[in-house]
Image: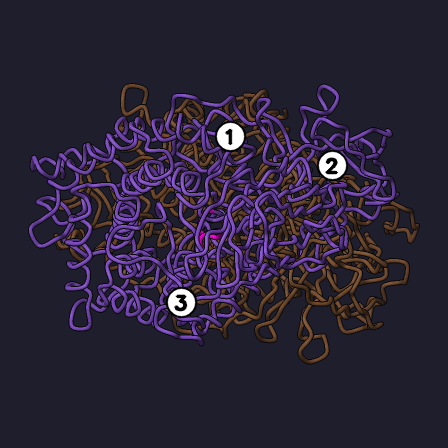
Chain colours: A brown, B purple
Amino acid sequence: MPADLTADAGTRDDTGGRPVVPSTGRLRPLGLREVRITGGFWGHRQSVNAAATLEHNLSWERRVGWIDNFAAVVEGRVSHDRRGREFSDSDVYKLIEGMAWEVARTGDAFAAASIDELSKVIERAQEPDGYLNTAFGHAGQGSRYSDLEWGHELYCYGHLIQAGVALLRAGVDSPLVDVVLRAADHVCAAFGPSGNQGVCGHPVVEMALVELYRVTGERRYLDQAALFVDRRGHGTLADVEFGRAYFQDHVPVRSADAFHGHAVRALYLASGAVDVAVETGDDELLAAIERQWAATVARRTYITGGMGARHMDEAFGDDFVLPPDRAYSETCAAVASVQLSWRLLLATGDARYADLAERTLYNVIATSPADDGRSFFYVNTLHRRRIGGLPAVDRQHPRAESGVRAPWFDVSCCPNNLARTFASLAAYLVTADEDGLQVHQFADASVSTRLAGGRPAGFEMSTGYPSDGAVVLRVTETSAAPWTLSVRVPAWAGDGAVLVEPSGARRPVRPGVASVTAAFAVGDEVRLELPMEPRWVRADPRIDALRGTVAAEQGPLVLCAESADLPAGRHVDAVRVDVDAPLVADGDGAVVASGALATPGDRDWPYTPDAGAATATTPARIRLVPYHSWASRGPSTMRVWLPVVTDQL
Amino acid sequence: MPADLTADAGTRDDTGGRPVVPSTGRLRPLGLREVRITGGFWGHRQSVNAAATLEHNLSWERRVGWIDNFAAVVEGRVSHDRRGREFSDSDVYKLIEGMAWEVARTGDAFAAASIDELSKVIERAQEPDGYLNTAFGHAGQGSRYSDLEWGHELYCYGHLIQAGVALLRAGVDSPLVDVVLRAADHVCAAFGPSGNQGVCGHPVVEMALVELYRVTGERRYLDQAALFVDRRGHGTLADVEFGRAYFQDHVPVRSADAFHGHAVRALYLASGAVDVAVETGDDELLAAIERQWAATVARRTYITGGMGARHMDEAFGDDFVLPPDRAYSETCAAVASVQLSWRLLLATGDARYADLAERTLYNVIATSPADDGRSFFYVNTLHRRRIGGLPAVDRQHPRAESGVRAPWFDVSCCPNNLARTFASLAAYLVTADEDGLQVHQFADASVSTRLAGGRPAGFEMSTGYPSDGAVVLRVTETSAAPWTLSVRVPAWAGDGAVLVEPSGARRPVRPGVASVTAAFAVGDEVRLELPMEPRWVRADPRIDALRGTVAAEQGPLVLCAESADLPAGRHVDAVRVDVDAPLVADGDGAVVASGALATPGDRDWPYTPDAGAATATTPARIRLVPYHSWASRGPSTMRVWLPVVTDQL
């Protein structure tokens, strides 16, 4: 791999901050001062995140007592007053991380003030030796590290460290940075080679420690992360009801054949493993994660990019067990998947990682929040059969599954994971290498950086994506020497994409990476035209739950049928579609399919030689809308996978 | 309803013992001295239960400490020494119930001695006021009834009372009977109209109390059961992660539209509600349960009769959500379903209840135990995609799901529920009414009872069922007056059944009940001939998970494909069947279908316009075996629902 592509010296990142800064790899990430989203699909969501979600989350964390827990430690009343689950500290840290990226992005005053206030509360709760957790270690509580399986202490450090890294890279002065360094040193002391030989039931500290190494240069953090990765998978944790695969402790990380167990845990661990591999030159470990990623994407991933098919343990299921109506597809697993794909993209440059990230961003991460940024899906099902209750705007929800977005959850990682993702999203769009710049995701954005040798390079990206398939890159900064401007051609585009060079020459481009190398002039335009005709897709026949059905896609968007678009009283389970008739875009973002509404006859027993034969159907036009927009017109029934019209079944 | 059909006076039941003895209803149950299973499919299972399972269960309950818990209470060490889950007492009681029926059935000495020994241990642990539980109420434990949601104290009383009722009816002298009466009186005092207004998170005490009323004539037990039924469904219990529907506390019992929540809880509660309805003349409540049963059977039940589609909360799912690969179909839910169907059959005489019981007996209850009676399926999936581990013959299993039967579980209700079901199974075959006798289930059996007016009536039932479709009823006792001998014609028989009268006259009979009324002579034969050609069945098209598939049945048996019958290295997910070709019985209990083995092409991403097109197939004969026998030749992959051969998908 090329040596040291990073500009991450010392504790301040003059790129404006990047979540992931590998010291080696195929591509160099750009920071929030180098790439700015200026509007459009994602610009709108960033604005809502800044204007609503950050405040919403902070207000709920106050209301449910998660912030007071820190004061309760200081005041010696925590064993009595503590509220929230054992990992609630981590959600305060995730929110701080999101606020740090928002300060980097816009200088947001509310975020800056909130960081300041929260940091002071947290700082006082840290023990002299660096230990910091409100659920363990104080009078009346379980002792430190007495429950590595479920206690989440190292998980909380992980998110604390990630918040600290964001503060450092964003250049936010905060006492929390010293808290983070003390906590990280405590972790190294307590869990180092001669310390506790355990690992945490919930990975994340691994990736956090590597990033802290990257930002500080302190090797011990990397070594500790590598230790945690290596220790796992040897029955290090106790067996639990869900089995050790639940927390990836059933097989060594480098030996697994795919991602197993709890999806968020698996994806955070894999991200940390990539980080360790990249920093230590462990190509075998990197290859193992690439192989596991490929197997998981081919066999254990929903069409939305969503991961996790099991409600019981929020886990990956067996290969090809992907029921749409019991999809778990947790929002946080999507966040984790994008983090992993990004790391693999930086390490390898392979466009398939950006393909999955795009799919996940548009179809899970964009789906979770309501348009006002104040309620969220925790679970992103692909099929809702019953009308859910009305949205509860002022109640914490005990459960993750519902047909309506909820303002807060007992386990409320998703709102904070979204907040930090939206605030830092610009850092996931474009990279640099020694030859030029690479566009991985399409959005209205401005890009300005320096290539090797200090050569300026920049462009404006303009697009109506995902509604429109034209992406225009207009060079705004350049130098005399030629450089290469590359764009990802999404896999979904098939043979339909065209690249228009600055000369006006049009050439068909295949999925992967399309490039123009030129001595660009300011004003030169490179234009990617993507085919936006809606299309039917079918599923691998081994996914039993999808047999006899099709789904519609348009551009990067998965579409769905929703009861709001059916005649009154009809529901989506009546929909049958004719795959031989064309899908027609109707001009307002929706697509219309030809098909029928079926009325299966009721029967006393559902399994008979003639079951299914008694289904009456009436022809109908079926309106399909972007999946990410579902349930935004009130509670509804919804399905992505639509049965095809047949005589039988 | 006809008045008082029962013969249950005082505490001794001279029928030899019946699990359910309603004071009114369409049909009168017969006891273990009136109906004896003499061999065949169920006779074998009864023998294995007596020879192996009772001892196996007792030995495991000793080994895992559940029996010592009672001694630990007496010796003041229970808060330190107690082992097992909070409801482990109940499994000792269930086993005693099973042993009591075995004593009634055969006079088994081991069972009698074990009851004696266990009763003495339990008796000493009861508090002076009747309270009896090893998990609560002692120094160092939670206080009595401090956790009605999860504490299971009333649930434990329910099984204790059922054991007591079995001892009374079986005529087994035991100090446990007085323990039971004291406990029941304690429940009435503690939870009566002026007591604790709560209910138990796990129903069963309702049906137990009604049966204790039936056996003792003490009205307060019935009143208490009715109170428990009426209290539930008003948010009486706290909200929990799974929602109040989990323990049927979301809507009053008589208002529900189907069975909801945890399947065993729902079915025990419904059984108790039927018992209350029958004894109090509450026809509205009975009609509500009938309606819920019908909706559940039409929309929420597996082809095996299995109930419960969700692993997370062992619960019914939404209508038509019945994934075969994530079927829960807990063995105990099948036991509970048979108990409920039996109550509804006795109340109404409707053959559909016996139809479901038959399906459940042959395809869930017969599936769970291994042939040696020493390992069990807790979960009865309809599709196993991976080879499981080798059977662990000497280890308690932490988890319910596996592709192999296990000897014991952390939650080990299934082995004991099977034990009490097999021991008492003869009581579920035949009933009487004022006109004669009714055969509901087919087995080699001898029947001898008295009809109204003391007229003797009896017959021998001989059959090779379920391998053979001929059931011969040969009259062995009769009187001069005519009486009616009825047999259920299973719904699965369609128009294929024939009844042969004693005269030799043959007449086609339709599903439901077929009767012969005659002044029978000893030696007269009534013969039912059922069509045993294997058949394909399809599923209601609203069961999305089964689209494009078929299942094979033969007689009452559901068949399955198993990897043991495929070429080496091939698995059941390759199977495709041709529904236009005949199914052929191969003479050794298996059936052969025409079809193919498919080899889907691997792909990087499973959702594309041409997914499924790349599947290569080779013609094959597909051997199908009874589902209840699966995994008895070693770990295997297995599926009940088989994709049909098509060009696409």
Of discs 3 and 2, which sits in the foreground? 3
Instruction: Label 1, secondary structure: give it.
Output: helix
Q: Is residue A303 left or right of residue A102?
A: right
Q: Is residue A321 left or right of residue B110?
A: right
Given residues B40 and B575, the one toward you in this image is: B40
Give the class, few, some or many, for how many residues have Cα within 10 Å of label 1's Cα (few <14, many ≥20): some
Q: Amino acid at mark 2?
A: Asp
Residue underneath mark 3: B24
Q: Which residues are magenta?
A: B335-339
Q: Do badges 1 and 3 share one subunit?
A: yes
Instruction: Label 2, secondary structure: give it.
Output: loop
Q: Quadrant of residue A117?
A: bottom left
- Nearer the N terminus, badge 1 or badge 2? 1
Q: Amino acid at mark 3?
A: Thr
Q: Are marks 3 and 2 in contact (CB under 8 Å)?
A: no
Name the residue located 72 percent from the left edge and 33 percent from the top edge: B624
| Residue B510, image x, y percentages | 71, 58
Give the class, few, some or many, for how many residues have Cα within 10 Å of label 3's Cα (few <14, many ≥20): some
Given residues A418 and B86, the one toward you in this image is: B86
Which mark is on residue B44? 1
Q: Amino acid at mark 1?
A: His
Name the residue located 68 percent from the left edge and 43 percent from the top edge: B555
Residue underneath mark 2: B604
Q: Chain of mark 2?
A: B
- Nearer the N terminus, badge 1 or badge 3? 3
